[in-house]
Image (cartoon, rainbow, N blue to C red):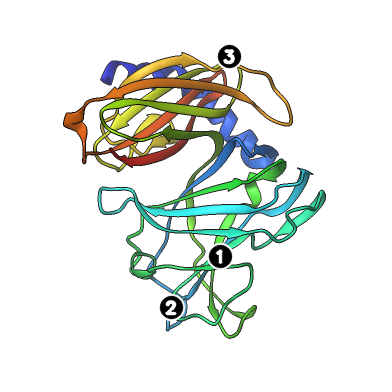
Amino acid sequence: MAGLMNVLRTACSVSLLVFLLASSATSQVLTSDQVLRIRFTVSSAWSSFPPPDVMRINLGLVQVVQAFTARNVSLHDCSSGTKQLLGTASDPSFGGYVGTLSLFPSNSFTCCNSPWTFGAPTAIDFTTIHNGTIDGILEFSIATGCMNIPLSQVGMTFLRASGPAGGTPISPDATITEISIGPRLQVLPGLCGGVNSLDLTGAQPGNPIIFGLDLSGGSAMVCPGVTVDLPAPIIMGILSAAGTAGCGPQGTASLNLFAPLASCGVTVIAQALEVGPTGCIPSNSVAVTL
């Protein structure tokens, strides 16, 4: 495992830096087969008290190429050594629209009986946001279609709400430490005593796909500036993505793994890594209790 990580780090070092610089300045396509992953931290030195009760996910000015139906985002915290789901938010507004669209904000999370209702927010626990300990991961996806997202415009801002759609901005904004659009992973059916399939969509056809598992969550750097959510990943297989390119990358890869009866009740975290000429791109990670 250590040897593989060293090879990846060496192979990706220069090309990935070029990829990160380019992708931060230009738009990238997000399809319904992919996920936009944002890793971030926050500071507890809030500019005012009480602290914020609204967290807004902003995508800036996007170009909707095919109607997306709904925008979905899940918020996770890895600060405790596991990938803890804090909540998911879904907003169908403008789901049938095609063209230039301002998604500032796209989705929102709230806490503390906030009066904010704009954009179908989800109420969650803000404890690790307020105290600045969150090791945050946002995973944004769309239900259908595809859109071009300028990654340089993506960010998270905070408010103290004064009403359903208004409030006072509270600084500082979240600090993004990593951002990428990559393939989406599903684990089906997620049962012990049988075969489970790790199904990946939204990869570039022909690129190698590395599938890994771990029993705990956290982070491990696999290429410069790129981390996975598996602190000690076990490589389960390496496949090549098959398929064709459409609105965006539509390559797929599936790995079948047998889960013995002895694994019943065990929680595993699965994640895939796409390795291409421009660097490494992680998929979302999926926690499954067998």
Question: Quarter of the image containing the N terminus?
Answer: top left
Q: For residue 108, which numbered disc appears in the image?
A: 1
Name the residue at 66% across, 37% down.
31
Q: For residue 225, which numbered disc appears in the image?
A: none
Residue assigned mark 3 = 206
Question: Tag 1 or tag 2, which sits nearer the N-term?
Answer: 2
Name the residue at 74% across, 31% down.
247
Left or right, 193 with reference to 77 = left
Q: Is residue 241 above or below residue 154?
A: above
Q: Is residue 111 visible?
A: yes
Instruction: Give the amino acid at mark 1.
Output: Ser
The local secondary structure at tag 2 comes to loop
Mark 1–mark 3 distance (CA, rounded to whole Å): 36 Å
Name the residue at 35% across, 26% down.
212
Is the residue marked by circle 1 packed among few (<14), some (14-19), or many (20+) residues within 10 Å?
many
Residue assigned mark 2 = 51
Name the residue at 45% across, 17% down.
11
Residue 231 in the image, given as x and y percentages of width and height:
28, 36
Residue 248 in the image, given as x and y percentages of width and height:
69, 30
The local secondary structure at tag 1 comes to strand
Question: Quarter of the image containing the C terminus?
Answer: top left
Q: Is residue 5 visible?
A: no
Q: Pointer 2 and pointer 3: residues touching (CB < 8 Å)?
A: no
Residue 187 in the image, given as x and y percentages of width and height:
41, 33
Question: Tag 3 or tag 2, which sits nearer the N-term?
Answer: 2
Left or right, 189 with reference to 214 = right
Question: Tag 3 or tag 1, which sits nearer the N-term?
Answer: 1
Instruction: Give the amino acid at mark 2.
Output: Pro
Question: Image quarter for residue 44?
Answer: bottom left
Q: Is residue 286 above or below residue 205?
A: below
Instruction: Give the amino acid at mark 3.
Output: Gly
